[in-house]
Each structure stands twice: as C-alpha cells, then as structure tokens.
Image (spheres, helix red, strand yellow):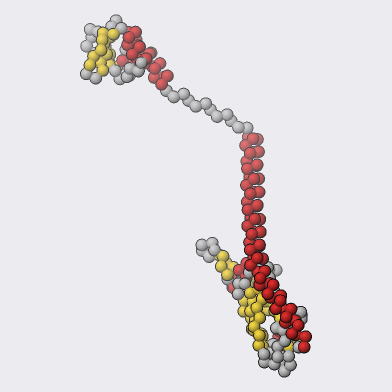
Amino acid sequence: MEWELQQGDSVRGPLTEEEVSEAIQRGLAPTTRARPVGTEKWRPIGAHEPFAEALQSLLASARPQSAPKPTKVPLWVSIVLCTVALSVLVTAVFSILVFQQSRATGAVVAEKMPLLDSHLQAIESMARESSAAEFVTPDKTELTCIATNSEVTCSATNRAAVPIHTCVRGKLSKKQANALAVYSLPMCTGRLGQFESKTLSAPWKGAFAKDLCSTKTAYGTEVLDWNECDFNTEAIGAL
C-alpha cells in the first residue's frame, strides 16, 4: 500500500510504508496528515496503524530521562555532620566575642593611661605639700562633687582655722545590682590654707560610667543613664 502525506498546502506521495517510517524517524511532525493512495479522508499519521508504533517510539526517545534518585544518607552521618557544624559555629562565635572584648578592654586602657599617669604625678606632688597640714576626713571640709562619663570632679574649701588636707574618691553603684560598682582614682587636696579652695579631678578606674550606667535606645544604641546608678564619695586615708 502506498501513502500520501499532507504538509501545509502541499501533498507528498505516493510513498511506501518504509519511506513514511523513515520520514517519521527523521523528525516528521506528528501532526502531519496521511491517507492511503486512492482514498479521500486525511487522518493524523499516528492514527494509521502502520505508523502508530514508530511514532510512539520516536516520542518516547525524545522525552528527558528521569534523574536518578539521590542516595539516601544514613541518619548517623547527618547527626555527626550537624554536630561538627554546630561545634565550629559555637567556637567561631566565642572567638569573635573574646576578640571584641579584648579590643574594647585594650581601648579603655589605652585611652586612660595618659590620665592615670598625670593623676598619679599630681597625687605625689600633693602628698609632699601636705606634710605641714593636718589630715581631716572629707566631712570636715566643704566638698562638692560631680561625675561625668570619664571622671569625677570635686571642689574642696577649707573652712577651718588651720591648714588641712583630705583625700576622697568617687563611687558609682548600679541600683539593680549592689555588687557592681566603679571607683575613681583617689583625689587628695594637698595643703589647703584657711578659706582656700581647690578643684580636683580623677578618672574612673578601669572603665567608664557608661559601662555601668547605661540603657538602650529604641535603635539598640547604649547611652549613659544616670538613673541606673547612685553616685557618692568615699573618704580614704592620707596618701
């Protein structure tokens, strides 16, 4: 039996079954219509029994091959890998925190070193001046002190009839945790004559006020908040 193929407005044929099958293998469109020579009705080429099998075989070979299923990893391997990853993550976070704390501590020490050196020199000088004056506790003088983030400043006035000297230090205590406190370095007046006044300043020792007395803003930034701490002064012995 010979066949005719309809492709657009043109008709090919007559063709043998072998020629039509070869055309299918070469990529003949499945929508192509065909009919036996001598008949009137055109039908899709796959509707003709001689070519249905060849067309189905061609379509099957054109389908993408399904991907192979991944090999299932044993549960114990997943547990070990998760444990190792978590351990590495914890170690990295801890190292970062230690590094940042070390940098912060080093920055505080570096910033305060010049202040500490100059303050200790001032104390030594005042100690020499005080040798001819009577040492009294701060409550025997007129003493007014204020605190800032970095230091304490006190104004002392001698209301006694004789020369005096005294020593004091500032103290910040956290209201919610009484065990936490920051002290300033000692402040000594040196020799104060009658009605003489002196202004003294001393940095906080090892920290800033904000390290203890701070709150966080709505943006997560820490700011100095004096409501978080109590400030007072303590008497210390003569230096």
* Quadrant (top left, top right, bottom left, bottom right) of the C terminus: bottom right
In this picture, is 119 found above or below 75? below
Q: Residue 48: x and y, percent? A: 32, 12
Q: Is residue 186 visible?
A: no
Residue located 76% across and 88% down the image: 133
Residue located 52% across and 26% down the image: 68
Q: Residue 95: x and y, percent? A: 65, 52
Locate residue 58: give its quadrant: top left
Front one among 36 and 225: 225
Q: Residue 16: x and y, percent? A: 30, 7
Locate residue 28: give its quadrant: top left
* Quadrant (top left, top right, bottom left, bottom right) of the N terminus: top left
Front one among 85 and 53: 85
In this picture, is 218 found above or below 7? below
Q: Residue 202: x and y, percent? A: 66, 76
Front one among 90 and 174: 90
Locate residue 126: give its quadrant: bottom right
Q: Seen in the image, is 201 located left or right of residue 14?
A: right
